[in-house]
Amino acid sequence: MRKPICPVLFKHLSAYPCSAEELYNWHSRQGALERLLPPWEDISVLARKGGIEPGGMVELKMHAGPFPYRFVARHIENTPGKMFRDIQEKGPFANWSHSHYFSNSVEGSLLHDQVEYSLPGHRFLPRFIKEHVKRSLENLFSHRQRQLTEDISLHQRSSTIPLRILISGASGVIGRDLLPLLTTGGHQVYTLVRRQPDPDKREIYWDPANGVLNESDLPELDGVIHLAGEYIGLSRWKEEKKRRVIDSRVKGTKLLARTLASQKKIPKVFLCASAVGYYGNGLDKVIVETNPPGDDFISEVCKVWEKGTRLARDAGIRTVFMRLGIGLTPQGGALKHILKSSPLGFIRRFGTGEQYISWISRDDMVSAMLHILSCPMLEGPVNIAAPQPVTNAEFMQTLARITGRPLLFPLPGWILKMIYGQMASEILLSGCRVSPLKLQNSGFRFRHPTLEVALRSLLGKELTEETIAQQ
């Protein structure tokens, strides 16, 4: 008779600055899974049913290199405040069972993760494959511990009172990170959509192009975060594209501001996205919120975008212009584009490489938004970018070193202008070195203050003692 395969037992113990009940509650809320998924993996949630109670199910689309596969997990056991367990119903493992145990400690709480698993043909697999799986799990759970520790600390500072929050642009790159951060903090989140809304998901219909948003559809709100707008993109700008970029921002912002201002009980705060492009090409000057706008297209977009909030400000709603730096995430935007288009190596620099990049990690960007919601001292323009901007050449050098890919030839500015025209001049070859001191002075703490720390965290690269000390 065949001897049954004895599954591998993987254990991870982590400590958190909250009670076991609070830690369990965080895991039970919508968005918990999304907050814990590793950013360096190409994973998307395809379907879900229920939560962590028995019968709850989630289906993920995952990848092994370029090859996609499905992972279906079902929750089979749950003791509220104490533990829950899920198993693989469909996926790459011969079997998989993940148990989470919560307990109180002297300084807070402990989470005991126990994973029992085996691979197809486990006993015949070479040792290096088994070691690779083990290292991957260690990397994954180390990331989960860092992420959860930071999220809980942030919520203790900023989520002491549950809020009712409305978001536009929730399906975009920023919105997909912001929504689960808010819901795991216990906030009630409504989203604006341009299709048939699902009331069970707290969706509300709007049509900003035609000025449609029924005030009666809105609940009583504490705050609004406005992110929607046409993606500017990395391509040559045609006049039609530029018109859509402006119209999508101005019409949506004015519609929201007008609707919020006319409510019987107005929200306390209105956060409107803008960009550090407001300042234009600042060369190597350190820029603060009182600096004047630039004179290029992006500056004009940001100026009219911010002006669109006037009715909200006149109604007494605390209004914040979030002048966002370049958000870094492998899931979208500039970093995803660079990684996908550079399999053999990275362009050494664009033009001279001396133009500054005011960057910020995806987690710091959405964390700053939650902080601003609960910080009444912040109003008007606020720079949301990491405290240590870098030049284009420094960015590429750091990315190449961390990923182990070589630096290739530099790309002269004239070639970029010939290919992309105005976009190259304003995005690729222009620079902005903003200071986030206003944000920091309000009490905000960055998770990823340096590019080295941010990229290693985002790309799943081991954090050295030196990079950990930088946090």
Image (cartoon, rainbow, N blue to C red):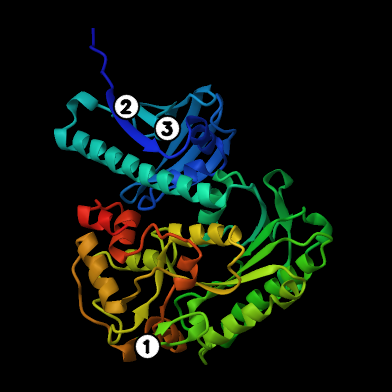
Q: Check contact, mark 3 vs mark 1: CB within 8 A.
A: no
Mark 1 neighbour density, 10 Å: few (under 14) some (14–19) many (20 or more): some
Left or right: where 195 falls relative to 278? right
In the image, taking residue 241 as reference, residue 402 lies left or right, namely left
Q: Quadrant of residue 248?
A: bottom right
Image x and y of residue 340, in percent? 34, 64
Mark 3 or 2, nearer chain start: 3
Residue 212 appears in the picture as rendered? no
Query: Label 2 sits on what residue type?
Result: Tyr
Disc 1 marks a residue whose amino acid type is Leu
Disc 3 marks which residue? 109
- Crowding around mark 3 (Cα neighbors within 10 Å: few <14, some 14 to 19, many 20+) is many
Q: Position of residue 127 (x, y in %)?
A: 15, 33
Classify mark 1: helix, strand or loop.
Answer: loop
> Measuring 43% from the left and 31% from the top, which residue is drawn there?
90
Mark 2, residue position: 117
For image coordinates 28% across by 59% down, the residue present is 470
What number is the disc on residue 283? Answer: 1
Q: Is residue 136 above or below residue 222?
A: above
Q: Nearer the viewer, mark 3 or mark 2?
A: 3
The image quadrant where one finds the N terminus is top left
Q: Quadrant of the C terminus?
A: bottom left
